[in-house]
Amino acid sequence: MKILVINAGSSSLKYQLIDMTDESTVAKGLCERIGIDGRFTHKAHGKVFQKDVAMADHTAAFEQVKEALTSGEGKVIDNLSDVTAIGHRAVMGGSKYDRSVRITEDVIQTIRDYASLAPLHNPAGIKGMEAAAATFGKDIPQVAVFDTAFHQTMPEVAYLWGLPYEYYEKYGIRRYGFHGTSHRFVSARCCELLGKPDGKGTRIITCHLGNGSSIAAIKDGKVIDTTMGLTPLDGFLMGTRSGAIDPSAVTFIMEKEGLTPEQMDAVMNKKSGMLGVSGVSSDDRDIAAAMEEGNPRAQLAWDMRSYQILKYIGGYVAALGGLDAIVFTAGIGENQDKLRAELLEKLAYLGVKLDAEANRVHGEEAEISTADSAVRAFVIPTNEELVIARDTKALI
Ligand code: ADP
């Protein structure tokens, strides 16, 4: 059985074809600059195929995917009918979806209804679903896997804010959390590594550190709190996002700088975080290199992020009533051993003992705490595509 996993953005579409007999990736690729000038990348048989090709919309992008999968040097299947089902990354499932679902007209309508809470992501997701049906035929089973679903176990005390309750009732203003598929994957693996595959009795903190970053507190295998909120802007400093700030700073800056809500949104989402503070880059490798050269603002951004992460971890240890394991994942979490070492050394008060040798690992699963550490620490590479493929298989 082969499952196609789709992650559709407003002008991009990532795909991965997974063979479920051994969960191997058969081919993957990326359509970029859809509706602009168009760039297409396909990887199969250990080779990379790239071309500039105009793709007017997501359906045109799917045509490129179809052609690459079924013909030429990168061909991996004979016919589209060799694809059994399609699994989509869907971002905002609101309070309605606490798990993945088969896509129907009703599901698409619900995702559309939530578009006011996720104006960039949800309409793009729908485009991906509709374009997939146009290319593969409307009878192909499709599944939506929501970024928010795994966080739906959060209690009210964690997901509500101290605003008038009517805004929650009228507009659904609350913490939803994101990266749920990743937190779910790595926490489930962590439970296995702890010898408690059902998660019962475990207290885990998962740190997804990438361009966008979030941390989740997971008790008995269920999320009890997470750093991202109504949108993926909440939490701590990310590549270009501010994370949590005093909300009054927003109205103050808007007034002083004469910014519209859209412009202020762009400041907080695209010009802030590591980029905004350092003035160097949003990419962690650039920040680390600038720090090596003694750039004080790069150092400041780095130190601010570490401090904020440590405050969240401390808060979550209190919420969990203790800690059994901490997990690092995503681009920075899997690769940035300097950051992991710094954080774990500062968590020594919890009885965490870093295994400096094991911590040299990049992009591979490893236990990075010593055998006598009171709290175990792991690097667990995330694999959101595999979760989407597994959920899709289970639902069809
Ligand atoms: P996203 O999926 O949110 O776009 P990723 O999880 O791919 O992001 O993470 C991207 C971040 O990971 C970038 O800041 C990048 O610098 C960092 N990163 C990737 N590889 C390495 C590495 N080998 N060493 C340090 N940082 C890395």
Image: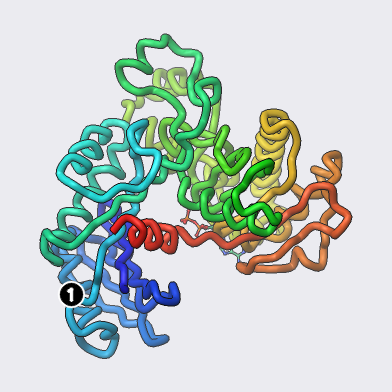
Q: Is residue 378 above or below residue 126?
A: below
Q: Quadrant of ligand 1?
A: bottom right
| Frontmost residue, 31 versus 73 | 73
Disc 1 residue type (three-letter): Ser
**Viewed as shown, does residue 152 lie left or right of 292?**
left
Here the colouring is rainbow
Image coordinates of residue 288 in percent, x first then y, are: 66, 58
State which quadrant residue 238 falls in: top right
Residue 271 visible to the viewer:
no
Residue 178 visible to the viewer:
yes
Extreme residue in the bottom direction: 73
Give me the residue at 55% from left, 43% from top: 214
Extreme residue in the right direction: 372
Q: Is residue 245 above or below residue 112?
A: above
Image coordinates of residue 162 in percent, x first then y, are: 50, 14
Give me the residue at 38% from left, 56% from top: 391
State the SS at label 1.
helix
Q: Quadrant of the C terminus?
A: bottom left
Q: Quadrant of the N terminus?
A: bottom left
Q: How many marks?
A: 1
Image coordinates of residue 210 in percent, x first then y, are: 54, 53
Image coordinates of residue 368 in percent, x first then y, are: 76, 60
Callout 1: few (<14), some (14-19), or many (20+) C-alpha neighbours within 10 Å? few
Give me the residue at 42% from left, 31% from top: 230
Give me the residue at 43% from left, 24% from top: 174
**In this figure, which residue is indicated by the disc labeled 1?**
81
| Frontmost residue, 146 versus 48 | 146
**Viewed as shown, does residue 119 lie left or right of 138?**
right
Q: Is mark 1 within 8 Å of ligand 1?
A: no
**Viewed as shown, does residue 111 lie left or right of 360?**
left
